[in-house]
Amino acid sequence: MSTGPKNNDFTIKIANVNGTGSASANALLMKTFFRMGIPVVGKNYFPSNIQGLPTWYEIRVNDEGHLARSGRLDLMVAMNAETYAKDLAEVSPGGFLLYDSTWPRRQMLNRDDITVIGIPLAKMCNEHFDTARSRVLMKNVAYVGALAALLDLDLKVIRESLKKTFAAKKHLAEANQQAIDFGYQYAREHYNCPLPFHAETADKTADHIMIDGNTAAALGCLYAGATLGAWYPITPSTSVMDAFKRFCEMYRVDKKTGKRDYAIIQAEDELAAAGMVLGAGWNGARAFTPTSGPGISLMSEFLGYGYFTEIPAVFINVQRCGPSTGMPTRTQQADVISTAYASHGDTRHVLLFPANPEECFYFAVQAFDLAERLQTPVIILTDLDIGMNDWMCPGLEWDDNYEPDRGKVLNAKELEEIEAFHRYFDRDGDGIPYRTLPGVHPKGAYFTRGSGHNMYGSYTEDANEYQEVVDRLRRKWETAKTYIPEAVVEYSEKYRTGIIAFGSSDGAVREARDRLKDSGVGVNYLRVRGFPFTDEVQRFLDVHDRIYVVEQNRDAQLRSLLLMETRVSQDKLIPVLHYNGLPIDAVGVLDQINKDLEKVVAA
Amino acid sequence: MSYIRKPQIIHRGLARNSLGLTVRDYEGGMSTLCAGCGHDSVTGALVQAAFELSIPPHQMAKLSGIGCSSKTPAYFLRQSHGFNSVHGRMPSVATGANAVNGDLYYVGVSGDGDTLSIGLGQFMHAVRRNVNMLYVIENNGVYGLTKGQFSASADVGSRAKKGEENVQPPIDPCQTVIAQGGSFVARSFSGDKDQLVPMIKAGLAHRGFALIDVISPCVTFNDHEGSTKSYQFTRDHYHPAIHADFVPPSEEILAEYEEGSVMPVVLHDGSTIVLRKADEKYDPTNRATALAMLQESQAASEIMTGVLYIDESKPEMHEVNQQTGDPLLNLDYKRLCPGNKRLAELQDRFR
């Protein structure tokens, strides 16, 4: 944090223009660290635009495995003249800046406290390549070559990566390798290589993968046996369905006939997407829809319908920066309240909070089990940072003995044997009634309605009959608590101060907690992984005197939810907030906690 | 929706269909709509059609939106699952349900408010996807449950009960759907069961989205003088262009028809509808002339009825999606899950 960069512990940022092909160069750079065995994370700060606007890619290399943003910038690769002044200003004192010296910088754009490295990238590309397109693209690869020299990257690893990426296009592999080589040579010849901080081959990424959360969630939907995906395109959730489609094409198409064991429907809007998954869930299939905050708003009427009529369905809310259109390519955790209570009337929804792509995979599977077990919509609340950035996480594993939990569904034989079927009758006392599927047996027929119904499934406007049903739904909510994934708790009796966080705040919180410990302040940590809150959350709230609730929104929404849904008192919960649209970093968390700790000491 | 359990009385002499069921087995709860409501006649026609087709009741799924019309699925086929969804959104529910199980008969019942105002978008997209379902609009030009506001199908110049004149041009679902590329478009009148029953059968047998726009007068709010959706006005301006006789797959076409005026159309399930032209000029397989004639008839304040357009060749949603023949919800889980070995292989690309 406050300490400077070290080997295998530094942050690089690449400033570029979107639409110039920098993504593949940046991916190559990041994968090189990963394949050298060094923990790494890449975060993409991109505009809501197709071509021509500024974009940044931030890579944090950290052998301790801290992979939130570092809050520091040790090496800036300034490829965008338009943002040059801002990019220059951002470099941490003592840091480095690499720029394309084909064009001279204005004298005033300088800093005494950093080292500036000029590499004539465009000039070299113009000398080596003929077409305008490859001259633009190869500039990016050339800076990777220069960085390979400056950071002492393993050239063998880069060569292998290029071969793998361009296996089918040999001429591209050669061109890329050429750009790497002349970038590398120039840096070696003109600068002291490597820099004081650089990469050292390690062994800390074995059995790990680099994956984004949306891809992992899509994989979870595939493995859960989802057969219908309905959606309306919305950033940052779109890549969930892109990935699901890709996986389905790989694994769910009959090779002979070309027939598909799935349906993907691009809906006319989010309302329709919600209706489609409820229709499919009612019929007995596993169906899901990925969306983001504005989509959840549009789906709210159907979410309430699904809650009241008890239809299983999975919703994935990849949160972005609101309100309204907000900043669609920036991250936030600001849909906690709107998702938990989405819709009118006494409505509440089961939520799952994955913290990383690994949990996106496993929670996606669990979401379908919960939805069918509890007969209700389940919403996975992830965000842009998890969904669209490249995370390092343990390789995913699948238990081949897994059987989907289809919940309480009566089959034809069971229906034949019972005297009469009553859709909303609580036979087992757990608040979960039995359901039937259309087409199975005439005795299973019932009428699904959003209007008042009694425990037998008939229409009612009777005061007692109505209340009986909504009270039973509340009992079901209590049952839900026993199915929600347990919170992750790191607890020592020594400490009376705690931190609560969820989702993508996890990395920054862990790092902040470690630094607090280094400075002699011990805190316990609980990461909430679902809603309704489990008993363990209440216990954690009970045993601490002061709890920092860390989250990425302005209004302390998780804190509000805790206040509404547990016995905790207002004074105990101190909000620690980050909501500018960039992923949370440990520095901000630490500063806010330290400030509060000072206040406590002073008092 | 609201209904009263109807006592089931089966007379010995009641006819039975090939499943051994009587028409009573296709009924539902007692209607709570106003006495004389056109919708109850449509309900009766649906019961009759399902009975005559010998559809196993539990093989049908009934869906609706919100409004008087959307209450009616509770009044027919009590042994079918029903889904009374949210206002204007029945098409999406039907689309999702149908996508995962194409083996059921899907009947959507909606009204002019539910379809042409709040639900116009979803309605058009269900048409566009050619979802295999029968979609019935019980069209009365008025909002009944909220007490008498004009709907989007009210004609210019039609008067509300309290005298107000409608000034907004109507949306004609038949013209709209023909223009959009719908594959089955029909119009009828709740007072003409002879026309409606075979039309419903044809709609159920049609592979794809079958629209039947039924003028179904609202006796309470829109049956007065000055209304263009009253029983009287509809009877006076009713113009059947095409009669449709439905012939099930197993039967031969026995009736004798005048040459030149008859057009048999073979449906996907092997049944036939024999279209008899009351209007010689009308061609229900020609989108452009059908549209032109509908517009002329509308300009003349006529209500043109019949199977107005049919195209059996258009692929329905499952075919467009290239889905496997079995309902997706019946696929064995082992077939859907690639398993751990493939997961391990797949992850090589993430390293």
Image (cartoon, grey):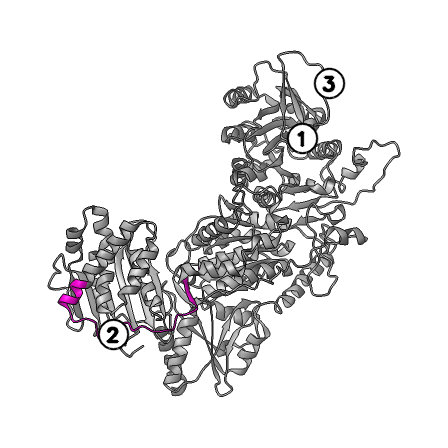
In-image side of A280 versus A547 (left or right): right
Image: B79 above or below A293: above
Identify the mark at residue A197; answer none if there is no mark.
2
The percent coordinates of residue A319 (x first, y second) are: 44, 59
Q: Secondary structure at mark 1?
A: helix
Q: Residue A366 placed where, x, y %?
A: 56, 62
Chief SS of the magenta region:
loop
Q: Position of residue A495 (x, y in %)?
A: 48, 86
Q: Nearer the viewer, mark 2 or mark 1?
A: 2
Q: Which residue is mark 3?
A: B254
> Given this view, does label 3 or label 1 mark the residue nearer the observer?
3
Identify the magenta region.
A185-213
Q: Chain of mark 2?
A: A
Task: Assign the N terminus of chain A to one quadrant of the image.
Answer: bottom left
Q: Is residue A48 above or below residue B263?
A: below
Residue located farthest toward the top when viewing the structure as drawn: B259
Q: Judge by depth and name the residue closer to the eye, A202 or A131.
A: A202
**Residue kind at label 2, given as amino acid type:** Phe
Mark nearer the N terminus (3 vs 1): 1
Task: Name the chain under label 3.
Answer: B
